[in-house]
Amino acid sequence: MSIPHPRSTPPVRRTARTLLAGLLVGALTGALVGAVAGQSVAVADPQRVISREVVFTLNNNNDTDVPCLADGEVHTVAGRLVGPREEVLGHAGSTRINILVHDAGTGGWFWNLQGARRYDYAGQLARRGETSLVLDRLGFDASPLADGRATCLGAQATMLHQVVQHVKSGIYEYVERPGAAVPHGAQVVLHGHGVGAAVAQLEAAEFDDVDGLVVMGWSDAGASTDAITEAARQGVECLSDDYVPYGATPEDFVSLLFATAPGRVRRAALDQRNDTPCGDVTSLLGTVGALNLGTHAVEADVLVLQGGADVRHRHESADTQAGRYRSAESVTARTFAKAGSALPLEKQAPKVRRTVLRWLDSTFVER
């Protein structure tokens, strides 16, 4: 029985098939290499997120309902823009700018902690496309004030209002490139922690010029015995000095702010701890009074964040505080179990940022 041989493929057809296969392999290989290369550039580009020092010229006046005095002089207040390169350099047009306002005893470093990427609030927000202005309030770090009694929390809120207006209009400067175009804030969201949250809230209530307000570790009427005791201790020390530490000892400072932060973060915070201007200390009670009367006037969207182990506030204060914003467009409250006051620096920091980013994305659809 004869077995039929397979029909030979004509040479021309075989050559064409070989050429086509080669072209397909080459195209697929090129596409894969290109995709991998593109991903490598996107991830590794060190210029995508940058930081630039900026300065504001502000009047140290009190235009709020807080009964306190300031020197009325012009001062330079420093900050850092942290965000995507094109936005920080002012090449992206108007954008959303988050203004970060620190607590007593800390400083701008609280929001932009160096050497611990996981706890760099501004840097991590920048990697998600957000631009932030990290402020050193007057009397702290790069914004020195010779006499700590020459300002007060009402003036701090008034200066924050000036910063908001300057950010919206582009009236501020890069330290290294004076006169260069700076980013404008089409939307401005204030993020405050502790007393910084009180300052941010006072600004939003009195001047009504921001789109959103993030309140971390603050309550108008829910202060704990520990918080009241510390405020009283500072007040006594301010009878004979113009700057006083927050926390009588380093251990007190740590226990007031932290519950779950790792040791290296606590050590970094202690290394950068600031004394508090006594004008801020002595005007705290008046600020609490003004907020108890005025929080209902906040019309911006509000996010209230508290730590479940925050020794400075009663555990029910997050929901209680959220209920005070009766005129706000929307109010969201979240408590992070086991976290202390310093939410951006606690182990729960990634969850805190995810909550903030989801809120920003869902609340402010247009950037």
Image (cartoon, rainbow, N blue to C red):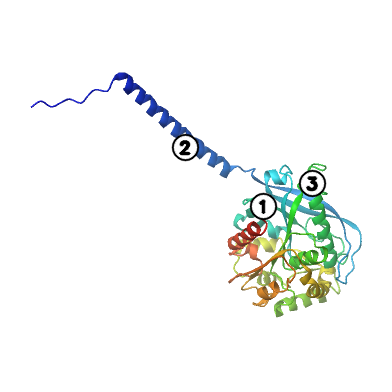
Characterize the local packing of mark 1: few (<14), some (14-19) or many (20 or more) Cα atoms within 10 angstroms.
Answer: many
> Can the viewer see residue 255?
yes
Q: Quadrant of residue 223?
A: bottom right
Give the quadrant of the N terminus: top left
Identify which residue is drawn at 64% across, 44% down: 48
Q: Amino acid at mark 2?
A: Leu
Mark 3, Cα crowd under 10 Å, few <14 / some 14-19 / many 20+, is some
- Going from N to C along the chain, the mark reached first, 3 or 2, is 2
Amino acid type at image mark 3: Val
Q: Are marks 2 and 1 in contact (CB under 8 Å)?
A: no
Q: Nearer the viewer, residue 235 or 58?
A: 58
Task: Find disc 3 in the rendering and name its residue.
Answer: 175
Q: For mark 2, what is the residue?
A: 32
N-terminal-most mark, 1 or 3 = 1
Q: Position of residue 277 (x, y in %)?
A: 82, 66
Q: Is residue 104 visible?
A: no
* Mark seen at residue 188: none
Residue 130 marker: 1
Of discs 3 and 2, which sits in the foreground?
2
Q: Residue 109 at what x, y percent from top left?
A: 71, 58
Residue 42 image offset from top left, x and y in percent: 57, 42
